[in-house]
Amino acid sequence: MPKTRNSQAQPGAAAASRGQGSFAVAIMAAGKGTRLKSRYPKVLHHVGGKSLLAHVVAAATRVCPAQDVYAIVGHDAERVKEAMAGSGIGFILQKEQRGTGHAVMVGEDILKQYEHVLVLTGDAPLISPLTIEKLRDFHLQQGAAMTLLSAVLERPYGYGRIIFRGKEREVESIVEEKSLSESQRGLKEINAGFYAFATKPLFENIHDLGTENKHHEYYLTDLAAILAKAGEKVVALQAAEPHEVLGCNTRRELAEVDAELRTKKCLQLMEDGATIYLPQTCVIDCEVTVGPDTVIEPFVHLLGATHIGSECRIRSFSVIINCEIGDGVLIRNGCVMDESRIGARAMLGPYTHLRAGCDIAEGAHMGNFVEGKKLKLGKGSKAQHLSYLGDAEVGESVNVGAGTITCNYDGFGKYPTVIGDGAFIGSDATLVAPVKVGKGAYVGAASCIIEDVPQDALAIGRGRQVNKEGWARQKREARAAGKKS
């Protein structure tokens, strides 16, 4: 996994090799997200199974190499960097959050080494690579100093409106909602908060920004008027899909965007050949893949980077997280599975629990209330009822009886249990690790096994049964006599 670069330490390190028309991407990710009422950075809140910032980074890195993408971080910056570790992007630190204009100012040393910069907002996860490409290409075609992405909204309340001049749709200024005149209030074309700049005029003029506003901050939107007055070309590209530019500023908006992403995912999976009954009841993350002719029943959760093969059936109320599932697998109701691999034609459940690190081989069965943790279950092996198999390596064609437990923890450390091919573990057996059961061996029901069992042996580890004739009758008679006296 590539290490995340700290771009403050090496600003523009590769810029010398970049030619005419080179682009950087700067993603605004420094905000606190006050309206979310959260102690976590705004851009780390999740929709569709990953953070707001991760969605924007994924779109940006489809357009530009990750080495040319920079997140401008501020509030809880280390947490944001940690969350994006491995993405390959760089970071620019905005120690004081003094507005969007200030965010670009602090990145000047890095960004000015490119010919152009795309500025994206880190809280708008619906933005697509295609829209970013269109913004980039339109900016180059127009030879503009600044290109804004705009959108026409039926209810533009709360957004800055774009004021145009002439028939060429050149931008004169952006007017914030509270500053609109009566004649401007009917305008529906809004500033979406995505920009392309030619870096030379950008940094020649950005320090002319002022803080004469309610929050005493430097607003990037004010550059439209500054550049226009300086005779630079400022234009706007209208987004084909206005909903792509919508940000997530409240919990309600997070929920709405999350629902949209998940609906889109279900539709895509069905178009690709999966059957999803009552998709509105399912929770399926953006990175999930499902093969054709797989059936997903209502109220299933498929989370993280889960990959499901073809011709599987996932029954209701199962929760599957970061798992790889082969073809023809049956997952019965109520299974919970995390960070595990399930081979082709295996059957699990109902109510099987796989904790991280399990590897269930082809044709294996795990049944009612069986729990595995770091379990390797061999081909064709079965553990059908009420068992716990932790830190265990179980060979092929093994039968694990109901109630079997591997005692893998002694209060200080974890120890392995190894069961050879073709072994038979009787019901209610207790295997105290570290212990090995040889190939073809039998363990008698209710045995406590504390020593290795040789191949093809029978191991019995329990107290000898003693029957005391008449004991129960005598007990009842004594009890009755005691009550009479």
Image (cartoon, rainbow, N blue to C red):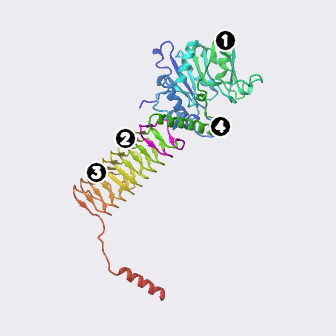
Q: Are marks 4 and 3 in contact (CB under 8 Å)?
A: no
Q: Say which residue label 1 marks.
A: 230
Q: Say which residue label 4 marks.
A: 35
Answer with left or right where residue 241 lies relative to residue 464: right
Amino acid type, callout 2 = Asp
Q: Earlier in the sequence, mark 1 or mark 4?
A: 4
Per the rendered image, the range of residues in magenta is: 279-300
Q: Quadrant of residue 451?
A: bottom left
Residue 154's place in the image compared with 346, above or below, is above
Q: Are marks 2 and 4 in contact (CB under 8 Å)?
A: no
Q: Secondary structure at mark 2?
A: loop
Q: Earlier in the sequence, mark 3 or mark 1?
A: 1
Answer with left or right where residue 78 lies relative to residue 168: left
Residue occupying the point 59% across, 33% down? 75
Q: Horizontal and vertical percent for residue 43? A: 57, 34
Q: Say which residue label 2 marks.
A: 327
Q: Quadrant of residue 202?
A: top right
Q: Quadrant of residue 166?
A: top right
Amino acid type, callout 1 = Ala
Which numbered tag is attached to residue 397?
3
Of circles 4 and 3, which is in front? 3
Of circles 2 and 4, which is in front? 2
Disc 4: CA contacts within 10 A as few (<14), some (14-19) or many (>=20): few
